[in-house]
Every structure is written in C-alpha cells, then in structure tokens.
C-alpha cells in the first residue's frame, strides 16, 4: 500500500476516534493536524483528513484545501463527522458547501455519523447549537428540551466504505 497518513482535527473527540480507527485498520501513520510537521506532507502518497462539522463547515478545511493545491500529486481523502443521521442527503450538501467548483477537491469525501458532546464543546458552540435547535423546533412546531444531551452515535462500521476506497486507491 502507498505511504498513507491519517490527519485529523478534533474538538470533542469524535474525529480523533474515527481517525484512530482508520489508522489502526490501515496500519498507517496518524497525526493531529496542529502537531504535524507540514513540511513532511510530501513523504505521503495518500492523506486522509478528518474533522468535525461546525455550522456545516469542516473544521480546518481552508488549510487542507491549500495543502491539496500545494501537493496535487498526493491523493487526498476527506471525512467529516457530525450528528445528522441522513447520510445520503447530508453528505452531498456538506461536500458542495465545503468544496466549490474551481477549488482544490479531495479524490473522495465521506460523512461519518458521530454525535454531540456538549461537555467538551466551548460556550460559543453550545450557544450556537441551542439557537439552531430552537430554529429547527420552531420550524417543526415542537419545543426544545431544557437540557442539551450528549450522544455518541459513532461506530466502526461507518468507516468500512472509506477503508474499501483507500485500499483500492492504495494499490
């Protein structure tokens, strides 16, 4: 298999969990984005980047797109983690809002169902979640629960499609 790196950025732990599972399954290098020496990117032939979604945007994607542009010889695969269960519709929406025509794009994009951990979120993100929940509830004619509840929906089964893709590309 080509020299592979799983690079991640994680605020609440879900992206890190998936990155670790992927690196374990592929028996490849793993690094947290801010701690990684960016000058060694050229040592890899395939890089998988994963991060959480915040208001539909993949955390750190601007920097990753610049790296993709600077290293077009590398095969880039991107995954995003979130708590929206409708993978089919949401995956396409997230891709289109993060990778516009004419910009650097990954060879493939995956959305992985993860969850929400309010205890690890900052005050600003908790407030945003409360506002979005209120807007959604109003639209649906329901009410928002008083207490925000954390939920972990992550599962190793969600990485299977990504693993198949990378193994096929890595030959």
Image (spheres, rainbow, N blue to C red):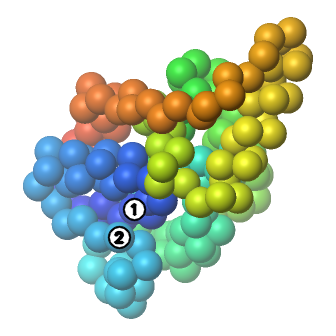
Where does the image place residue 45, in percent across and percent down from the top left? 30, 67
> Dot 2: few (<14), some (14–19), or many (≥20) neighbours within 10 Å?
some
The residue closer to the viewer here, 165 or 125, is 125
Q: Residue at x 58, y 66 (%)?
A: 60
Q: Quadrant of residue 88?
A: top right
Quick check: 142 above or below 135? above
Left or right of residue 95: residue 24: left
The quarter in which the N terminus is drawn is bottom left
The residue closer to the viewer here, 10 or 42, is 10
Q: Residue at x 54, y 21 (%)?
A: 85
Query: Can I make out residue 144 in this image?
Result: yes
Query: Mark 2 vs mark 1: which is more N-terminal?
Result: 1
Is the C-beta separation of discs 2 and 1 under 8 Å? yes
Left or right of residue 81: residue 134: right
Left or right of residue 24: residue 77: right
Q: Residue at x 65, y 49 (%)?
A: 126
Left or right of residue 158: residue 93: right
> Dot 1: few (<14), some (14–19), or many (≥20) neighbours within 10 Å?
many
Where does the image place residue 18, in percent across and percent down from the top left? 31, 46
Quick check: 102 above or below 107? below
Disc 2: which residue: 32
Numbered label attached to residue 8 = 1
Is label 1 in a helix, a strand or a loop? strand
Q: Residue at x 35, y 70 (%)?
A: 32
Mark count: 2
């Amino acid at each position: 298999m080509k020299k592979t790196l799983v690079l991640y950025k994680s605020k609440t732990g879900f992206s890190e969990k998936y990155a670790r599972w992927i690196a374990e399954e592929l028996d490849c290098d793993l690094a947290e984005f801010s701690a990684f020496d960016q000058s060694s990117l050229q040592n890899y032939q395939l890089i998988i980047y994963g991060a959480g979604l915040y208001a539909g945007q993949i955390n750190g994607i601007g920097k990753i797109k610049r790296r993709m542009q600077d290293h077009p010889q590398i095969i880039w695969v991107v995954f995003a983690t979130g708590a929206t269960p409708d993978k089919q519709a949401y995956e396409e929406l997230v891709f289109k809002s993060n990778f516009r025509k004419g910009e650097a794009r990954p060879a493939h994009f995956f959305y992985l169902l993860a969850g929400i951990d309010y205890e690890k979120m900052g005050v600003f993100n908790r407030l945003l979640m409360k506002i979005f929940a209120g807007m959604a509830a109003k639209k649906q004619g329901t009410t928002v629960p008083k207490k925000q509840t954390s939920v972990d929906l992550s599962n190793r089964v969600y990485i299977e499609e990504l693993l198949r893709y990378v193994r096929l590309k890595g030959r």
